[in-house]
Each structure stands twice: as structure tokens, then as C-alpha cells.
Image (cartoon, helix red, strand yellow):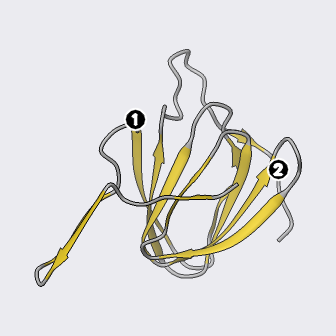
Amino acid sequence: MIEQMQPDFHFEDERGLICQLVSKGWNQFNVIVTKAGSRRGRMHYHTQNIEAFYIISGKIDYQCQSVQTGESEWCIFSAGDFWSVQPYIGHDFYFLEDTVHIAMYDLGVNLPDGTRDIIELGEQQR
């Protein structure tokens, strides 16, 4: 359910680094800053969007669950990790450290018909 991704371009030298995550295919790009001990997502899913995440700094306890099969996965992600989640995969985040991360959507959450592509699964037990 979790698909590891690689940046399109990565360059590093004595000055620092340039990391181009993607060069095309994404319509919404969010930078999210969250304090340790917080939770975001509340096990929601998208019916149309592929969503991708990149951790700039910090650490996340990430849970995902297939809406169709109930199968679930847990993973700890930290700085430099890059992954995507397909439609109908619920996901939830618990922040183990102060974290800065990026969330990208291929279509965008606000759809052309005025609806939003976010569906809550409800409170899940950790």
C-alpha cells in the first residue's frame, strides 16, 4: 500500500543540496509544520487523488488501511523519506518529533465540481 518514491533529481556538494522531488504530474503542494505529539489525518482517504509525502525534518508514525480490504500497514518515516498513497487507502499521522513535511496531490483536494476529495474513516485505535 505504501509506495516508496525517489526524487526526480538530487545534487549535493560542499554548498548543500538541491532535491527536486517532482518535475510534473502534481497540482497541489502543501508544506506542513507539526509539533511532536500531534496527530493529523484522522484516518481519511481520497477517492480520486494520489497523494505523496516527503519528510524535510522530524519523524512520523504513519498508518494506512485499505478501505476495500481492511489490510493495514504501519511505518515510521523520517527526514528524506518520500512515498505515495493511492486512492481508497486511508491514512493517519502521529508526529513523534517536531516535523516539517510536504504533501502533494495529483489532482488537488478541491475538485472542479466544488466538492472536496477527503473522506473520513473515523477515529481509529492506535
Question: In the image, what residue type sits under mark 2?
Answer: Gly
Q: In the visual, does 67 lie left or right of 85?
A: right
Residue 64 is situated, as x and y percent measured from the top left of the image, at 73, 58
Res 84 seen here: yes
Q: Please say if 26 is above or below 110.
A: below
Q: Quadrant of the C terminus?
A: bottom right
Residue at image point 65% right, 58% down: 2
CA gap, disc 2 and disc 1: 27 Å
- Name, please, the residue furthest toward the top: 113
Q: In the visual, does 11 lie left or right of 21?
A: left
Give the labeled residue for mark 1.
Answer: 27
Res 43 seen here: no
Question: In the image, what residue type sits under mark 1?
Answer: Asn
Residue 116 is situated, as x and y percent measured from the top left of the image, at 60, 30
Residue at image point 64% right, 44% down: 86
Q: Quadrant of the N terminus?
A: bottom right
Residue at image point 42% right, 72% down: 80
Residue 99 is situated, as x and y percent measured from the top left of the image, at 47, 74
Asked where in the image residue 54 lies, by quadrant, the reply is bottom left
Number of numbered discs overlaid on the protein picture: 2
Q: Please say if 103 is above or below 17.
A: above
| 124 or 67: nearer the viewer | 67
**How many residues crowd around disc 1 within 10 Å: few (fewer than 14), some, or many (20 or more)?**
few
Q: In the visual, does 21 lie left or right of 76?
A: left
Query: Which of the labelled discs sits on residue 94, or is there none?
Result: none
Q: Secondary structure at mark 1?
A: loop
Give the labeled residue for mark 2.
Answer: 122
Instruction: Looking at the image, tell me whether mark 2 or mark 1 is earlier in sequence order.
Output: 1
